[in-house]
Image: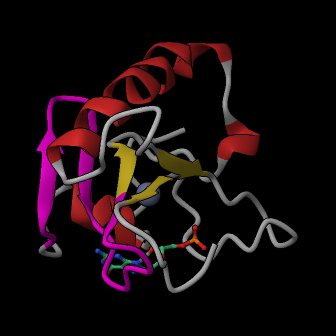
Amino acid sequence: MSAHDPNCIFCKIAQGKIPSRKVYEDEDILAFHDINPWAPVHFLMIPKLHIASLAQAEPEHEAVLGRMMVLAPKLALQEGCRPYPEGGFRLQINTGADGRQEVHHMHVHVIGGPRPWAKG
Ligand code: 5GP
Ligand code: ZN
């Protein structure tokens, strides 16, 4: 599998070819605000490596996926989610057609902030 898919919008964002409002970036991970947020906090976390969906996750991806899980709560607080347990946030990974995945580069929605939310 190549690192980037030239037709993938999130690969283009990861490479800086399409602008995004960045929340966090390191060598392997990018987090950026969702273009169509449905809660006061709504950003996406992606591995820079092109993984089409969580259904394609393999043992070689455990490190980056694990790092994303540990990073998510820290970024959620930084972006305005209130602390656990009164506050909190929601992680959502839409996978495949039944999972209503629209962009086929694996991503974690991090959603939170004071309710009400537009959905969810
Ligand atoms: P999903 O694939 O999980 O259903 O949703 C993809 C998410 O990506 C949607 O919430 C949508 O608003 C967001 N999105 C799609 N295209 C772009 C884009 O070009 N920039 C940003 N920042 N978000 C996008
Ligand atoms: Zn991609």
Judge from the rendering whether residue 18 lies leftward or rightward of residue 98; answer left or right.
left
- Front in this rendered view, residue 89 or 48: 89
Residue 107 at x, y = what percent?
A: 49, 52
Q: How is the image coloured?
A: secondary structure
Task: Name the quadrant of the C terminus.
Answer: bottom right
Q: Is residue 50 magenta?
A: no
46 w.r.t. 38: above or below: above
Location of residue 58 in the rendering, given as x and y in whole percent from the top left corner: 68, 23
Residue 115 in the image: x percent, y percent? Answer: 44, 71
For image coordinates 68% across by 60% down, the residue present is: 94
Answer with the quadrant where ligand 1 appears in the image.
Answer: bottom left
Residue in view at x 37 percent, y 48 percent: 45
Q: Residue at x 51, y 57 (%)?
A: 105
Residue 28 found in image quarter? top left
The residue sitting at the right extreme is: 98
Whether residue 19 is situated above or below residue 13 in the rendered picture: below
Residue 22: x %, y % from top left: 12, 58
Residue 16 in sight in this render: no
Residue placed at 31% from the left, 72% from the top?
40
- Front position in the image: 6 or 107: 107
Residue 12 in view here: yes
Q: Is residue 23 left or right of residue 76?
A: left
Of 20 and 115, the residue lying toward us: 115
Q: Quadrant of residue 36?
A: bottom left
Q: Is residue 118 above or below residue 108?
A: below
Let me know if residue 24 is in the magenta part. yes
Q: Quadrant of the N terminus?
A: top right
Q: Which residues are magenta?
A: 20-43
